[in-house]
Image (cartoon, grey):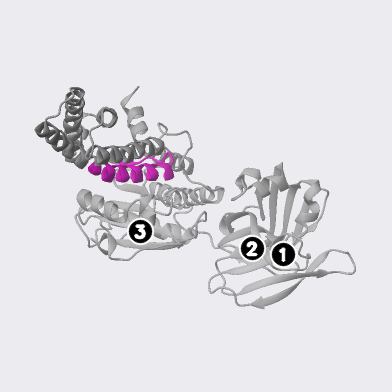
Amino acid sequence: MSSQRIQRLTQHIVFRLFICILICVDLVVEGFAMVTNSRLLDGTAMLLTFLFLVEDLFVLFGLGFRAFFLNWVNVLDLTLVTICFVLAVITFSILHVRTRSIILLIGLRLLRLPRLIHAFRLFKAGNSRLIRAARRTVSENKRRYSDGQFDLDLSYITDSIIGMSFPSTGLMSLYRNPMSEVEHFLDLKYGSSYKVINLCHERGYSSFWFHGRTQRYYIKDHSVPRLSELLDITKSASQWLDCTKGHAGDPKSNNRVEGGSCNKRCIVIHCKGGKGRTGTVISSLLLYRGVCSSAEQALRFFGERRTDLGVGSKFQGVETPSQRRYVHYFARLKNHLNWKIPNVRLKLETIIIEGIQPRHRDDVMKWYVEVTSTQSPVAVEFLPHHHPLNSVHTFTLLNSRWSPELQSVTYHLFTGDADDCVATCQRNCWLEGDVQVKLREPKNRTTSCCSMRAGRTILSFWFHTGFVTDHRLLLQDDEFDERSSGRSSEMFTDHMRISVQFSRE
């Protein structure tokens, strides 16, 4: 068995739970052994100490001699468990000789004292190792940074770009990266020459952490940043790495930015799990800095460095099709558009959904299509009502305030061909920039089709109007976010697709 496999074995949560159970048993055995002489108790204690010695030898072989002996805690533990094993053998052997000597009995109890102390120390160490095992279980097969001193869900994508999961405090730190350990690691490695970018919309932390060298962008989970925001993030990160305020790679950009040495700078990017939003931004940063020349190369580069194939086969790359789509947009900005985002305004005409299971056509008729654009402060909704001429649902436009940043337009679906559904825009609906489309169920499936209480999202996708060609956006079955949910798979055939039709000014 290789050293890597042994190391993974000793760090597995099942193995750690087993060791914790043995430690609890050892504490009970040593407690009873302090007040009574029993060959059975001493034999059990000797066996348990032998198992702890085997565990330490496994850890030694898994980490390697250098890494093991660099950590004084490992050395202390191996020394104590070896001494305790020798004492356990001596105690068991002497007890075999039936003696009435008071002095000898007192000596045997004194020999048990270091074993009891070691059992308490094992209990404390076992808890910390169990916590580390829980963190490894949560991080799945994401590549971790482990050097004997640190064990963090943190991956070096390049020498100066780090992707990681959310640094946490409180109960969450039991199974995610502890904030204090991450800060200590970065302080030790980079001093004042690092910066942390938080991409989480759902949670943040005080600027007290990381000495205030943090920047936050509010991106929702499983979503994408606005394309302009993605460009801003990568530009800001690149400027930090280059110690300049100008464009990355521009020889005229020699304005220095404050904050640490420029010799060994590092940028740390995280979301919650350190995969979807983090991968989108880091893949774009790899393109921006010229590490990769194409979107596919950048996505593969990130995924390979975030994945530990020795632990599992799951590829820990960018998660959703929309996130990958935006990395492709970013590559086109670099390779064809000289970093200029196209400013295109499109009028939404129809949304056609093909590949609906025939037995679910009636359910789909109660769904809603929600279109959200990030360019307008006005929210609008379309309420369906019965049209006497064609027996389909048309729409009355209502204006309402909903969000200071988003424009939302909701349509009720009606059936077209046998396995198709069509949402047709009855009023002018102009979209510009980043747009999200959602298919949503009513909150109550028994609700009448005139209810506007939209509930769970069946599927969704993001696109940018500047990259729509021929007035049409066509997405296939594997290009939707949240498509893998059971409800979505049940509703659609394997050949499901959505076509969005536009017209221009």
Q: Nearer the N terminus, badge 2 or badge 3?
A: 3
Q: Are marks 1 and 2 in contact (CB under 8 Å)?
A: yes
- Residue 381, given in percent of the width and then of the height, sits at 68, 71
Q: Residue furthest front?
A: 100
Category of crowding for the residue at label 2, using alpha-carbon neighbours closer than 10 angstroms: few (below 14), some (14–19), many (at least 20):
many
**Mark carried by residue 170:** 3
Secondary structure state at the residue bearing disc 1: strand
Which residue sits at x=31%, y=56%? Answer: 179
Kind of residue sitting beneath label 3 = Gly
The residue identified by callout 2 is: 371
The residues colored magenta run 120-146
Instruction: Specify the principal SS of the magenta part.
Output: helix
Instruction: Residue at 42% x, 54% y: name it.
Output: 271
What amino acid is at disc 1? Answer: Tyr
Q: Is residue 347 above or below residue 323?
A: below
Disc 3 is placed on an element classified as helix
